[in-house]
Amino acid sequence: MVKKIIITGLVSVISTASFAGKQIVLDHVPSTHHSGSSYIGAAVGVGSPNAVTGSVFAGYGKKVGKDERFYLGGEVTGSVTSGYTFNNYRYGSTRHTYNPSLGASFIPGVMLTPTLMAYGRIGANVTHFSHGDNYPAAQLGLGLQKQINPNWAVRGEYVASSGDGFRQRGLPASGQANLGLVYKFDE
């Protein structure tokens, strides 16, 4: 139920801001990416299996290309997840929890409008599972980010992670939908 509410919220915020942008005068908001900018942010998300996540992130990004239609960025993320899996095959009926993770991502994007960006996430993270296990995982994701004013943006994304920590617990991957708020520092 919580997952459906967050996903519905993601779709509502992004679609309302992008389709109503001209009516509420958001499409003329100046971008802070021209010479590159640092940013920080926070996000909440829900995912599989049985996970609720809070994260903080920091990064640097820059529009590139003749018309500045493309975006290149990098980001580091720290998150805390409340999630668990039950694996009746390999570990009996043991409950495996996973909590903190640290990650880094390359973020390429394309500007759909002057204030709306579609982006991808290619990265890696290390997740700490119960019983002291730390496992690396690859991450791939897709998202949309909407600039609301020169310093603030909202983003929604879906990120999939896959690595040994998940496979050893009977899971091919973990998926997560996130809704975040971004603060961009002045150039």
Image: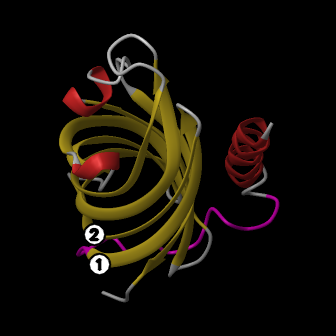
Measure the C-alpha gap from mark 1 to mark 2: 6 Å
Q: Residue at x 72, y 57 (%)?
A: 21
Tag 2: amino acid: Gly
Q: Secondary structure at mark 2?
A: strand
Looking at the image, residue 1 lies above or below residue 179: above
Identify the residue under disc 1: 38
Q: For this rendering, which residue is in front, 45 or 89?
A: 89
Q: For this rendering, which residue is in front, 115 or 135?
A: 135
Verify CB contact (< 8 Å) between mark 1 and mark 2.
yes
**Residue lying farthest to the front in this orientation:** 92
Query: Residue 180 lies in what quarter of the image?
Result: bottom right
User: Where does residue 35 sit, x and y in percent of width and height?
Assistant: 23, 75
Q: Residue at x 50, y 38 (%)?
A: 84
User: Where does residue 136 sit, x and y in percent of width and height?
Assistant: 17, 41
Residue stretch rendered in magenta on the structure: 23-36
User: Where does residue 176 sit, x and y in percent of width and height?
Assistant: 50, 38
